[in-house]
Image: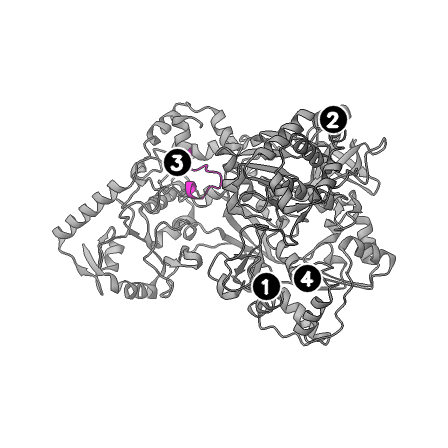
């Protein structure tokens, strides 16, 4: 997030898109609800009628995969009606002419054709957002899990810059991170192209710095593979070994049939996890890891806040903290890694990561933590980013053209399947499905079907249906609900009994590598 | 009536710790106070209303109630002798009401045994602990009338100590406790109580809200209004001193043995009332919220209140912690004043 959670209560408007906030980030969702009840406006852009729809001043239900067109349409209205922030555009940004030229083609009429959103609703949303004093954009996987995920994010950033809704309190572009430490994992360089703090592996000075810090030579300066490309490489036999930590691609990656083939094609697979996941079942070696309560260390949350958590209980059996396991593997491989503990590792993070330099153990151990960037030990941390200038100086508008879903419905596969999560289960269920109370609340896979579609197909509530795509087929119960629009069905990837990723499309964003979980073509029929 | 110099308290707790598990306010990180086993370093008297009531010592979050093996069933009844030191009067009332709820019709041997082995030492409040306290309205504070074994009144350098039971008297019969000048002490306590009572604000609408509920005068639209913003965390029930609902699960401990646990549950969860057929008599979140508040403010009023006005003890924790402000205070006000 560019901004912080504490700022929600002072926002005048929320532009919420691609996040089922109350279900997936309930404490942020609750802040949105409270602010709306205190007078803030809510513009919701989401195909589904999620809980926040009850509170929305306007709810735009776009056709799935048309986010760039929606956002361009909103910018078109804002520019046409001269509602944009001229001063901000002139002093803080570059490339406005290009944006204007692209946006000019996305008139409300054109956008209505693409997105299904009525012109007048689009215009109202644009005016509300542009005219608000402090408006926050919130998004999550509904924006990113598309073949155009990067374009969708760029378009959100364009919209915020166009209206000057960034660089001030209670504004900004705020991706809600779905796990307690996904921000931290990215910050620590668990990405194929960067070291900690997004320092690029291809930059020579960065390479030199890390070689010096680790007293080694010859660090690889070529970008590595993303998960989606790794799986393809494994299937081609080019990738020989994989070491997977805390990830369950057998359930979480698209087109599971091919994932199984890819993993089976490896010479060697290691899985390090707290439970024996579906992926771990395929492994040559399983390394038991400690859970969050069984180890100490830092987490970096959605607002870039680094907090220290102390171990509460000992890990069971042979389980150990991830860092201990990795350290032993390194030693056995001939590298003398020798950390004494998480405190020691944090010291190294401080030394090699400019944005984390001032986030020392002493400062965060007995407090609620510090948000990066925090370049030195006197720095108070950063509540919101881009205050007087962007990291690179001027913010560059990066206009994008609308590109449809990689797989659009046709006669044979005439529905769009969009996937997500429910409130009670978490991801592939490795943890939450072991909790009896959560299993009571959400025991099985459900597919949401619109009542009109259900009537036409003869499907009643709780009927068993078959859902098929070009890649596979699953059986699960139907819930007949207006939460989904016509010709769209929604399901979740929590349940191995009806593994929805057997159906999803592995087509992915060319830049980030993220697959298009949010839309693929399927057909649905009632089981006899 | 006894008197104890404040500086001697730690010695007293150490002494009690020889024969009892003494649970008392301990300071943990971020200035958070938790009731935990007496620890000289972390023990503190500088506390207000701990976030959690002391109910987890009587009804643990997860509790093995029996084990089973080839030899049969073996109930697990905890009989550890415990002292709860420094609980608030509202929480004392919560324990009394919960004990009634858990034993009046069916004897919950696990709860009852823990309660019977627990001595309660109440720290009377000199005023509201924060802005949500309304115990004077629910008649559950700021001091305890019944149920306590000992009650401490903070008089600056000393505590005046009232005994409420024989077991309590036995605790203060020797050692650092001295006899107080009876009439002077009573006068001091009278004045302490009066000042405390005056400082705690009344929740004026409570009685009217209870009347409306009793007469079916609250429409479901009000509950649905709350229901549509509830994020179903269940937190209100977990922080509530009188919420005791639990779920029961069985699990294998090894190939030839297993155990049954009970774990905290919440009536705010859809599955709590869902029937085997799939039918749910509390079919919406609004109706579940209605159920919870009717339990506190409408039903069980004759049976479980122990001198209180209702089975809400006015601690205000649900209003403190509900992320979307569906606490008893907000609900009561909405019932009387309508929705804003």
Is B287 in front, or is A89?
A89
Closer to the N terminus: mark 1 or mark 2? Answer: 2
Closer to the N terminus: mark 4 or mark 2? Answer: 2
Residue under label 3, please give it.
Answer: B329
Residue under label 2, please give it.
Answer: A109
Is the C-beta separation of discs 1 and 2 under 8 Å?
Answer: no
From mark 4 to mark 1, how far is it between C-alphas?
Answer: 37 Å
**Crowdedness of circle 1 by 10 Å Cα count: few (<14), some, many (20+)?**
few
Residue under label 1, please give it.
Answer: A316
User: What range is drawn magenta here?
Assistant: B318-330
Q: Is residue A139 visible?
A: no
Q: Is residue A117 left or right of residue A3?
A: right
| Residue A397 pos. (x, y %) | 70, 44
Task: Check chain identity for marks 3 and 2: say if they share one.
Answer: no
Q: Chain of mark 1?
A: A
Residue under label 4, please give it.
Answer: A199
* Element under disc 3: helix
Is A344 in front, or is B251?
A344
* Of marks 1 and 2, the one in the foreground: 2
């Amino acid at each position: 997030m560019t901004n912080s959670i504490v700022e929600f209560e002072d926002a005048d408007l929320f532009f919420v898109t691609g996040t089922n906030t109350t279900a997936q980030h309930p404490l942020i969702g609750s802040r949105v609800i409270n602010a709306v009840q205190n007078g803030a406006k809510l513009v919701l852009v989401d195909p589904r009628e999620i809980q926040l729809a009850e509170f929305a001043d306007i709810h735009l239900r776009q056709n799935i995969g048309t986010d760039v067109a929606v956002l361009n349409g909103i910018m078109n209205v804002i520019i046409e009606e001269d509602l944009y922030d001229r001063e901000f555009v002139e002093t803080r940004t570059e490339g406005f002419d290009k944006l204007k030229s692209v946006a000019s083609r996305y008139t409300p009429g054109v956008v209505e054709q693409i997105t299904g959103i009525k012109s007048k609703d689009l215009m109202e949303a644009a005016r509300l957002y542009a005219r608000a004093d402090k408006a926050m954009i919130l998004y999550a996987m509904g924006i990113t899990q598309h073949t155009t995920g990067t374009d969708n994010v760029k378009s959100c950033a364009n919209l915020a810059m166009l209206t000057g809704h960034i660089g001030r309190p209670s504004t900004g572009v705020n991706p809600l991170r779905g796990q307690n430490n996904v921000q931290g994992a990215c910050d620590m360089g668990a990405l194929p192209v960067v070291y900690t703090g997004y320092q690029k592996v291809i930059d020579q000075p960065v390479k030199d710095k890390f070689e010096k810090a680790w007293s080694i030579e010859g660090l690889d300066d070529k970008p590595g593979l993303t998960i989606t490309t790794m799986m393809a490489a494994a299937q081609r036999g080019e990738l020989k070994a994989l070491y997977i930590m805390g990830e369950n691609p057998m359930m979480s990656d698209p087109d599971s049939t091919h994932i199984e083939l890819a993993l089976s094609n490896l010479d060697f697979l290691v899985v390090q996890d707290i439970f024996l996941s579906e992926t771990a079942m395929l492994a040559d070696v399983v390394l038991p890891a400690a859970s969050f309560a069984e180890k100490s260390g830092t987490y970096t949350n959605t607002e870039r806040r680094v907090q220290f958590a102390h171990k509460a209980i000992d890990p069971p059996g042979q389980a150990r903290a991830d860092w201990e396991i990795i350290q032993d593997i390194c030693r056995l491989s001939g590298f003398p890694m020798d950390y004494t503990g998480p405190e020691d590792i944090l010291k190294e993070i401080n030394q090699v990561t400019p944005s984390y330099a001032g986030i020392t153990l002493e400062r965060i151990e007995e407090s609620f933590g510090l948000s990066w960037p925090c370049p030195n030990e006197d720095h108070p941390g950063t509540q919101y980013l881009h205050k007087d200038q962007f990291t690179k100086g001027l913010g560059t508008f990066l206009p994008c053209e609308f590109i449809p879903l990689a797989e659009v419905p046709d006669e044979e596969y005439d529905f769009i399947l969009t996937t997500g999560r429910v409130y009670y289960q978490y991801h592939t269920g490795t943890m939450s499905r072991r909790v009896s109370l959560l299993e009571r609340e959400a025991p099985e896979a459900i597919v949401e079907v619109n009542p009109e579609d259900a009537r036409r197909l003869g499907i009643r509530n709780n009927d068993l249906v078959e859902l098929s795509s070009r890649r596979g087929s699953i059986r699960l119960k139907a819930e007949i609900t207006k939460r989904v629009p016509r010709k769209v069905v929604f399901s979740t990837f929590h349940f191995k009994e009806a593994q929805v990723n057997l159906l999803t499309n592995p087509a992915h964003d060319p830049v980030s590598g993220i697959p298009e979980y949010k839309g693929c073509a399927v057909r649905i029929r009632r089981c006899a | 009536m006894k008197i104890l110099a404040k500086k001697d308290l730690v010695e007293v707790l150490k002494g009690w710790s020889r024969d009892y598990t003494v649970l008392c306010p301990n300071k943990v990180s971020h200035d958070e106070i938790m009731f935990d086993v007496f620890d000289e370093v972390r023990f503190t008297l500088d506390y207000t209303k701990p976030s959690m009531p002391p109910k987890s010592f009587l009804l643990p979050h997860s509790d093995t109630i029996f084990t089973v093996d080839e030899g049969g069933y073996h109930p697990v009844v905890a009989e550890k002798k415990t002292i709860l030191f420094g609980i608030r009067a509202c929480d004392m009332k919560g324990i009394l009401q919960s004990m009634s709820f858990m034993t009046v019709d069916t004897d919950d041997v696990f709860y009852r045994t823990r309660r019977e082995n627990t001595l309660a030492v109440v720290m009377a409040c000199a005023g509201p602990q924060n802005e949500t306290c309304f115990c004077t309205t629910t008649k559950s504070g700021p001091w305890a009338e019944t149920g306590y074994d000992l009650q401490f009144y903070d008089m600056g350098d000393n505590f005046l100590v009232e005994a409420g039971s024989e077991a309590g008297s036995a605790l203060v019969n020797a050692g650092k406790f001295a006899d107080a000048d009876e009439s002077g002490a009573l006068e001091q306590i009278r004045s302490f109580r009066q000042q405390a009572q005056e400082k705690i604000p009344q929740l004026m609408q409570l009685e009217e809200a209870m009347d409306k509920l009793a007469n079916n005068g609250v429409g479901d639209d009000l509950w649905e209004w709350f229901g549509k913003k509830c994020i179903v965390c269940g937190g209100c029930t977990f922080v509530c001193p009188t919420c005791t609902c639990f779920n029961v699960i069985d699990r294998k401990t090894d190939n030839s043995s297993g155990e049954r646990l009970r774990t905290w549950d919440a009536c705010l969860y859809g599955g709590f009332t869902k029937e085997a057929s799939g039918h749910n008599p509390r079919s919406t979140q609004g109706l579940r919220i209605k159920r919870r508040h009717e339990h506190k403010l409408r039903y069980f009023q004759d049976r479980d209140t122990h001198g209180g006005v209702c089975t809400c003890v006015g601690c205000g924790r649900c209003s403190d912690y509900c992320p979307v402000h569906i606490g008893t205070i907000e609900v009561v006000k909405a019932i009387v004043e309508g929705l804003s």
